[in-house]
Amino acid sequence: MDNDIQIRLIQEDNRVFLDMPDTPDNPCFSCGACCQHFRVSFYCGEVAGGSGGFVPAELVTMLNPVMACMKGTEAGGARCVALQGTIGQPGIACGIYANRPTPCREFPTWLDDGSPNPDCQRLRATIGLPPLQPVAPTPPHTSEPVQLSDPLATLSECLPSAPAQADTDCCKPLLEGEPAPPYAVIHELNRHQP
């Protein structure tokens, strides 16, 4: 299978957003498992309103002054309020797909090497769907990855209690200067919420 099903959109800041076309071979239109499993947390600047965001404010819960999440996903393991349809059945879809938050835009169904995302495979199995097959590899990313100059300072600016909490195994790549996509930073912030 070609990898035309997962469209990579490289942003000016080197973030890679993924779009899935409205076609019969889009496996997401008969799944929805990720939308009822993960806490969908993101920077509050993405919330529609005075900040210029795009995620409908009425579908969002504010976690703290900096972070928001989709209603229904606050604790993880529950269905996102924007999800329409029945999990694991044809026709399931995001009601705000064009305005979905960054974690949803960055979650890949297939990895760059064409292999299915292990999280996607695991969640599909939990609802009785067959595993996805590999696709052709994504062409190499031509831009240099964005390096965080001081990840600890970045975490400190976003969450004042992060320095004391960030000295854990899950944050070591961020603290050691490894390149990290924005969703990894969001993940680390989420793990250290009080």
Image: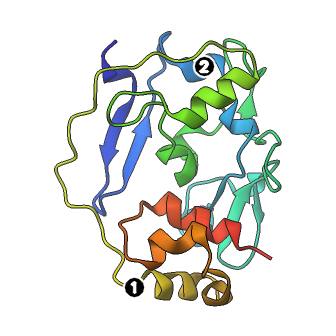
Tell me where residue 21 sits by quadrant.
top left
Which is more foreground, mark 1 or mark 2? 1
Question: Counting other residues with Cα less than 10 Å from the Cα at mark 2, is it few (<14), some (14-19), or many (20 or more)?
Answer: many
Residue at the (67%, 11%) spot, across then down: 90
What amino acid is at disc 2? Phe
Where residue 54 sits: x, y (%)? 56, 55
Q: What whole-number distance in Å separates the C-alpha atoms at marks 1 and 2?
A: 40 Å
Placement of 99 over or under 68, stated as above or below: above
The residue that label 1 is drawn on is 150
Placement of 172 over or under 101, stated as above or below: below
Secondary structure found at label 2: helix
What amino acid is at disc 1? Asp
Where residue 56 sits: x, y (%)? 67, 53
Residue at the (52%, 40%) spot, across then down: 98
Front-most of 172 and 84? 172
Front-most of 1 and 44? 1
The N terminus sits in image quarter: top left
Tell me where residue 83 sits by quadrant.
top right
Where residue 45 sits: x, y (%)? 57, 69
Front-most of 62 and 119? 119
The C terminus sits in image quarter: bottom right
- Residue 29 disc label: 2
- On the question of residue 185 being in view, the answer is yes
Question: Counting other residues with Cα less than 10 Å from the Cα at mark 1, is it few (<14), some (14-19), or many (20 or more)?
Answer: few
Q: Left or right: where does residue 111 sit relative to residue 66?
A: left
